[in-house]
Amino acid sequence: MSATIIDGKQVAAEVRAEVATEVAAFVAEHGRPPGLATILVGEDAASAVYVGGKQRACAEVGIKGFDHRLPADATREDLVALIDRLNADPEVSGILCQLPVPGHLDGVELTNLIAAEKDVDGLTIASAGRLALGLPGLRSCTPAGVIRLLRQAGVELSGAEAVVIGRSNLFGKPMAQLLLQANATVTVAHSRTADLAGVCARADVLIAAVGRPEMVRRDWIKPGATVIDVGINRRDPAPTDGSSSLVGDVHFGEAAEVASAVTPVPGGVGPMTIAELLANTVQAARIQAGAGAS
Ligand code: NAP
C-alpha cells in the first residue's frame, strides 16, 4: 500500500484564508478587529520564535496583535496584574501565556488566570472541564487541528478504533476527548502501557504524541489505518544531505507503506496549531460580542 500524504500546510492555509474572511466580516460588523495578546516571560529563544510566529500569523489575517514581553525576573504580581488587565480589555479577544515560564513562576497557575472566554489555547481548567463535559468552549489548538485534518482527509471517526499515544494535558487528554465526541472508541496509551505495539496495531486511527523519534514502526500499524504524527523531534546529528532536521514519532517511510493515510513531519500537524489559534481568536471575539460558543 502507498499511503495518501495528508498535507497540513495546505489545510492550514485554507483555515487561515477562512479566518481572514471571518476577520473582515467581524470588522465590518463591529468596527474593530479581533485581538490576540501573547505573553512571553524571559529570553527563551525557542519561545521567542513561537511567539513571533503567532504574532506574524495574526497580522497576516488582520487580527490585532498585543505582544507583551516581560523580563525573566518578572514577578508573579506583574503577571497577575497584566493578565487581569488583558481579561478586562475589550480589544483583547484572546490571551495566551507562552509556556514554559521561568522556574519562579507557576505556568499552570498563570494560565488559569486567563478568562475562559479568552482562553484561545484551551488550556485552563474551565476549558478542559467544558471539553470533558461536552459543553461548548474554546478547544486546545493542536488536537482541534488534528480533528480538522482527519475530517479533511475524509476519515470516518464514528465507530472507529482510535489510539492516542501520550496523555499530556496539552495534547493527549484533549485529543482523546475530541475523538470521543466524534464517537470514536478511544484508547489512550502512555509509558506504562503493556504491549504498546499490540494496542497500536488495533487502531483504525493512530495518533502519536510522545516525543520519541520514529518510535512507531511498520508492525505497530494496522494495514489501511490513518496515522497522525504529532511528534516534533530534532535529528541528532543533524542531516547533512539537505533533508529536514525534524522528525516525528512515526517512522514515516514504513508508515507510508502500510497506512492508507499519514501526516508528514514537518508539514503535517505542525502548521495546524497556529491556524487553529487564529480560528479560536475569531471564535473568542464572537463569543464576547454575544454570538455564543460553537
Ligand atoms: P509530553 O508532555 O512529554 O507527553 C509525552 C507523553 O508520551 C506522555 O504521556 C508519556 O507517558 C508518553 N510516553 C513517553 N515515552 C513513552 C513510551 N516509550 N511509550 C509510550 N508512551 C510514552 O509531550 P507533549 O507535550 O504531549 O508532546 C508530545 C510530542 O508532540 C512532542 O514531540 C511535542 O513536540 C509534540 N507536539 C507538537 C505540537 C505541534 O505540532 N504543534 C503540539 C504539541 C506537542 P507518561 O504520561 O506515562 O509519562
Image (spheres, helix red, strand yellow):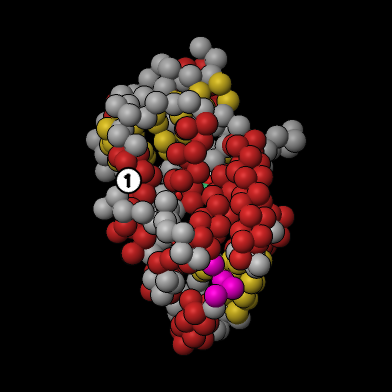
Which of the pair 284/29 is nearer the observer?
A: 29
Which residue occupies 69% across, 59% down?
A: 62
Locate residue 200, reporting x and y percent.
34, 29
Which of the pair 64/67 is nearer the observer?
A: 64
Which residue occupies 26% across, 53% down?
A: 133
Packing grade of label 1 (10 A; few <14, some 14-19, many >=20) is some
Q: Would you say 36 lies left or right of 283 here?
A: right
Whether residue 209 is visible: yes
Locate residue 49, reporting x and y percent.
66, 60
Query: Is disc 1's CB within 8 Å of ligand 1?
Result: no
Which of the pair 89/265 is nearer the observer?
A: 89
Picture quadrant of residue 241: top right
Q: Would you say 147 lies left or right of 268 here?
A: left
Is 52 located above or below residue 89 in the figure?
Answer: above
Is 32 located above or below residue 292 in the figure?
Answer: below
The dominant secondary structure in magenta is loop
Which of the pair 62/212 is nearer the observer?
A: 62
Kind of element beneath mark 1: helix
Whether residue 214 is visible: no
Q: Which residue is mark 1?
A: 177
Locate residue 146, reporting x and y percent.
47, 40
Picture quadrant of residue 127: bottom left
Which residue occupies 27% across, 43% down?
A: 192
Residue 91 lies in the magenta-colored region? yes
Residue 103 lies in the magenta-colored region? no
Magenta residues, as a range? 90-94
Q: Amino acid at mark 1?
A: Gln
Picture quadrant of residue 201: top left
Which residue occupies 50% across, 23% down?
A: 261
